[in-house]
Image (cartoon, helix red, strand yellow):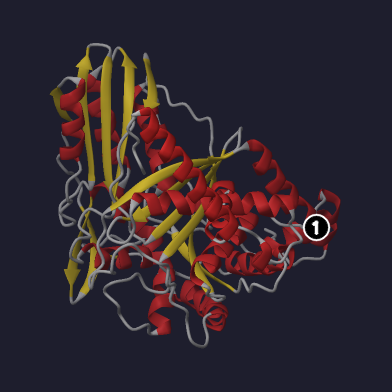
């Protein structure tokens, strides 16, 4: 098996060039992940260990729930749906796993069977909203399944399907796997047996061979974070609480297709990706808000680097901490080249767990913040994936999200017509109008980048046309005097005509 590094894809853009490069490569031995020997307890993965600790912090009890809501339209067989969920639980050991402390370390315990029942009730539209709020509850990590499913019957042909899983046993890819297999089991499909389970991955991750590989990657990450580490000091509306709060809201906004195409063109012309351009723009936004020219942003990565892991439900997501230097004197394009190299280097060392990096850096614990970074950025491609249960049509059902694990998180989705953006913000720090202003400034910034990608970062403006007009008036004495005279004349005319005026 030949292994390409991330940067090789950019260095060798054609199939012919890749073929020539492969001819000169050494073949890498592919080793399967083996099934672990049966035991009462198994180690947790690195990602699970960190989540277990975070879950126990005050106020974080529901921060790692993964809820989802769907509308089902058509004729539903409730018994078949419940049996499909039970089939999933029997198939995936992850859904029968509980977590305990043993000798001061978290461990996972797999149960041969667990009880599961589809929560069901009938309700009207307004009652359903309250039922949705009550459905999201704290999981007891000791008691599987850490999966909850509910069904609200609005009418014979309309149901709301509620799902909630804990992040300890699931990630975004896992949700897709669960839905695909749920559809298959509901339709009577026989699924191919799984060769390994998540516990086997956790044991493999602790093997000497894997530890040796991670040790080699550790040197790269420690080099990235040598010296004094920056702490992002975004201006906030409220004083930062002594202990981090997890309440949050999400603001949605859109970048139109013309700007989106312009950003893609910049990426193509500079051997980069849309993700790199958007990330560079986001870090420039942070630089302009804080004045800091040393910035760390977190970004999620699927973490399924081994082929054996593709069909498994479990927590594989790793977090990459990307450190960049958006100095005002750099041009955007030269800075984009730096972001490209930083991102490719991180991808090539992506299996090193973020949890291990935090531990290796020996960061002082600050209960008011996340370790190493306070903001996340991600880009995903929206797939027109439509799940169909037999005789039913499924559609997403609007559900308010009230959790924020970081100060700010910007998630961008690439669709067919522009970019859909979601800005998640901590309500303990920011007002909604501040989040709205930040979103508008990001839109304005990417527009400025498209219009003049070779400009210096210092000259890229965040200000909207409305804000520029306000500033012109605020700093133009002649304009202020003219406004005063205009108001005076208008007021005199108003009094003369006997009409009342409302001043704002």
Q: Position of residue 313 (x, y in %)?
A: 38, 47
Camera-nearest residue between 409 and 110? 409
Taking 76 as reference, is 440 above or below it?
Answer: below
Front-lying residue, 424 or 220:
424
Estimate the x, y position of residue 60 in percent, counting from the top left.
Answer: 23, 60
Residue extending furthest bottom?
A: 227
In the image: residue 475, left or right of residue 9: left
Residue 195 versus residue 429 in the image, above or below: above
Q: Residue 500: where, in percent of width, then height?
A: 32, 33
**Residue under the point 37% across and 38% down:** 178
Q: Is residue 390 visible?
A: no
Along the viewing direction, whichever of 398 and 359 lies nearer the viewer: 398
Q: Is residue 90 visible?
A: yes
Q: Residue at x 70, y 41 (%)?
A: 261
Residue occupying the point 50% across, 80% down: 215
Q: Residue furthest front?
A: 496
Give x and y (percent) for residue 264. Answer: 70, 47
Q: Please tell me which residue is depicted at 32% across the width and 55% down the height of the picture.
A: 404
Local secondary structure at mark 1? loop
Which quadrant of the figure contains the C terminus? Answer: top left
Depicted 332 relative to depicted 495: above or below? below
Image-quadrant location for residue 133:
top left
Badge 1 local density, few (<14 within 10 Å), some, or many (20+)? some
Q: Please, is residue 200 above or below residue 223 in the view?
A: above
According to the picture, the residue beneath numbered tag 1 turns out to be 12
Quadrant location of residue 353?
bottom left
Placement of the N terminus among the 4 image quadrants:
bottom right
């Amino acid at each position: 098996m030949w292994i390409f590094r991330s940067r090789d894809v950019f260095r060798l853009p054609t199939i012919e060039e890749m073929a020539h490069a492969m001819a000169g490569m050494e073949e890498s031995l592919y080793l399967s992940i083996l099934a672990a020997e049966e035991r009462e307890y198994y180690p947790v993965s690195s990602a699970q260990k960190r989540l277990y600790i975070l879950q126990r912090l005050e106020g974080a009890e529901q921060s790692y729930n993964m809820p989802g809501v769907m509308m089902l339209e058509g004729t539903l067989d409730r018994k078949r749906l419940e049996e499909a969920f039970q089939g999933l639980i029997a198939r995936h050991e992850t859904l029968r796993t509980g977590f305990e402390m043993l000798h001061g370390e978290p461990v996972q315990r797999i149960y041969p069977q667990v009880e599961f029942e589809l929560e069901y009730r009938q309700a009207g539209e307004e009652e359903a909203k309250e039922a949705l709020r009550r459905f999201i509850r704290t999981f007891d990590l000791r008691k599987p399944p850490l999966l909850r499913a509910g069904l609200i019957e609005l009418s014979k042909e309309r149901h709301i399907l509620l799902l909630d899983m804990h992040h300890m046993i699931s990630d975004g890819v896992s949700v897709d796997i669960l839905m695909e297999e749920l559809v298959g089991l509901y339709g009577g499909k026989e699924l191919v047996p799984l060769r390994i389970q998540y516990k086997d991955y956790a044991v493999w991750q602790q093997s000497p061979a894997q530890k040796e590989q991670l040790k080699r990657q550790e040197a790269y990450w420690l080099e990235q974070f040598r010296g004094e580490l920056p702490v992002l000091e975004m201006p906030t509306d409220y004083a930062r609480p002594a202990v981090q709060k997890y309440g949050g809201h999400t603001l949605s906004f859109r970048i139109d297709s013309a700007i989106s195409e312009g950003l893609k063109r910049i990426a193509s012309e500079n051997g980069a990706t849309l993700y790199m351009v958007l990330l560079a723009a986001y870090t420039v936004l942070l630089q302009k808000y804080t004045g800091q020219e040393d910035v760390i942003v977190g970004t999620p990565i699927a973490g399924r680097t081994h082929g054996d892991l593709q069909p498994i439900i479990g927590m594989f997501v790793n977090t990459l901490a990307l450190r960049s230097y958006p100095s005002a004197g750099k041009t955007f394009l030269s800075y984009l080249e730096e972001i490209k190299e930083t991102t490719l280097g991180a991808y090539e060392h992506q299996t090193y767990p973020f949890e291990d990096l935090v531990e290796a850096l020996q960061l002082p614990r600050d209960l008011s913040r996340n370790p190493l970074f306070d903001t996340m950025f991600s880009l995903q491609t929206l797939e027109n994936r439509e799940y169909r249960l037999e005789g039913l049509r499924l559609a997403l059902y609007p559900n308010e999200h009230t959790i924020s694990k970081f100060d700010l998180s910007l998630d961008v989705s690439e669709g067919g017509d522009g970019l859909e953006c979601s800005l998640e913000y901590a309500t303990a720090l920011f007002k909604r109008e501040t989040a709205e202003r930040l979103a508008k400034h990001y839109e304005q910034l990417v527009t400025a980048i498209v219009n003049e990608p070779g400009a210096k970062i210092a000259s890229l403006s965040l200000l909207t046309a409305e804000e520029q007009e306000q500033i012109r008036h605020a700093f133009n004495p002649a304009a202020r005097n003219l406004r005063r005279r205009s108001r005076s004349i208008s007021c005199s005319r108003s009094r003369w005509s006997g009409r009342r005026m409302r001043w704002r």
